[in-house]
Image (spheres, grey):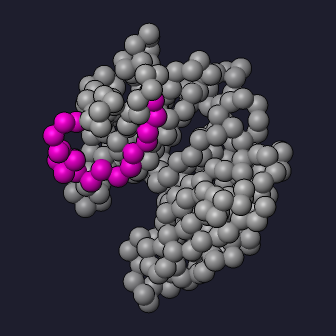
């Protein structure tokens, strides 16, 4: 985009970067949340931006489905290669899915990578949940990608690609990606899918809390983050390893990376009420 226009987007809420067309230049999918559905319904219209290589972008949003398809309340988008054909698709996690926009998955329908349609229904990922965050990766090592979505309704949605049916199936319960009932886990926000215990496979970390708690709200004291470690068949709850998980803080953002360059992943958690927390991984 050659002119400043970001302020014309009502509440842009997330961005996913990838070289979608293989020209060596980064392209962007921008989530636009719009207004809260429970205040004054005005969903946003997501944008697809093609990188031009000079720091500017071309708005090619009209090549992605219809305006109705792109209208939702997206918090996070993720690029992924569903079928291993080296052509990227983009998964869009929408909020208010129980009674509003569902999750989307856009895929190229021919040789033109920019001519994309919503194939979420056909692939089984058109979930209606209150999506907050999302993460993508091959958890079970079978070559197919899993999609993990955090949700504000006491749940984590985990979908796994089945190569036989060429669709996604819900494995949340079968794989144990279920938050315990006690202590309470009411609203999940950020989602990380990384090898958090350095054993060669991917694990899940999700943050939990509410965005608008007052200091004397009793619910503040019962929210805890979740750490689920993959054991080869299912997840083991290792949430007690999150040493900075202080009840009473509304955890929201999360990011993993090797901060101190010792070869182990570290995790940074941000709170809507209180300071951030840094968890140092040990090699």
99 in magenta: no
Report whether residue 169 is seen. no
Q: Name the residue rendered at 41%, 29% in the picture.
A: 25
Q: Name the residue rendered at 31%, 22% in the picture.
A: 63
Where residue 88 appears, x then y in whole percent? 50, 26
Observer-nearest residue: 216 or 9? 9
**Position of 23 relative to 256 (above/below):** above
**Position of 235 relative to 164 (above/below):** below
Q: Name the residue rendered at 43%, 42% in the picture.
A: 16
Q: Which residues are magenta?
A: 1-19
Q: Is residue 186 toward the left or the right of residue 245 in the image?
A: left
Where residue 113 appears, x then y in whole percent? 42, 18
Q: Is residue 229 toward the left or the right of residue 166 in the image?
A: right
Task: Determine the image quadrant of residue 3.
Answer: top left
Observer-nearest residue: 267 or 160? 267
Observer-nearest residue: 230 or 85? 85
Furthest-bottom residue in this view:
216
Where residue 226 appears, x then y in whole percent? 65, 64
3 in magenta: yes
Furthest-top residue in this view:
111
Report whether residue 86 is seen. yes
Where residue 2 appears, x then y in whole percent? 19, 36
Q: Name the residue rendered at 84%, 45% in the picture.
A: 232
Quadrant of the snapshot with the C terminus: bottom right
Q: Number of marks in the image?
A: 0
Quadrant of the snapshot with the N terminus: top left
Task: Determine the image quadrant of residue 259.
Answer: bottom right
């Amino acid at each position: 985009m050659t002119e400043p226009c970001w302020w014309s987007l009502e509440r842009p809420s997330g961005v996913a970067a990838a070289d979608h067309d293989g020209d060596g230049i980064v392209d962007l999918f921008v989530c636009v949340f719009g207004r809260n559905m429970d205040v004054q319904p005005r969903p946003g219209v997501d944008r697809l931006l093609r990188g031009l290589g000079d720091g500017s972008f071309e708005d090619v949003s009209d090549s992605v489905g219809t305006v109705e398809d792109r209208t939702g309340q997206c918090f996070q988008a993720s690029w992924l290669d569903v079928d291993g054909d080296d052509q990227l698709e983009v998964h869009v996690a929408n909020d208010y899915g129980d009674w509003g926009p569902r999750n989307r998955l856009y895929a190229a329908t021919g040789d033109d990578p920019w001519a994309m349609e919503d194939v979420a229904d056909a692939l089984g990922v058109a979930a209606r949940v209150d999506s907050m965050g999302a993460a993508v990766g091959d958890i079970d090592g079978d070559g197919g990608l899993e999609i993990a979505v955090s949700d504000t309704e006491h749940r984590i949605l985990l979908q796994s690609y089945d190569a036989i049916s060429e669709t996604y199936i819900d494995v949340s319960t079968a794989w144990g990606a279920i938050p315990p009932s006690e202590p309470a886990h009411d609203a999940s926000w950020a989602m990380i899918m990384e090898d958090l215990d350095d054993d060669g496979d991917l694990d899940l970390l999700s943050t939990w809390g509410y965005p608008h708690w007052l200091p004397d709200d009793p619910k503040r004291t019962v929210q805890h983050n979740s750490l689920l470690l993959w054991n080869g068949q299912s997840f083991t709850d290792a949430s007690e390893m999150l040493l900075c998980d202080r009840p009473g803080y509304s955890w929201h953002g999360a990011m993993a990376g090797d901060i101190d360059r010792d070869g182990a992943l570290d995790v940074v958690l941000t709170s809507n009420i209180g300071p951030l927390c840094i968890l140092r991984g040990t090699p």
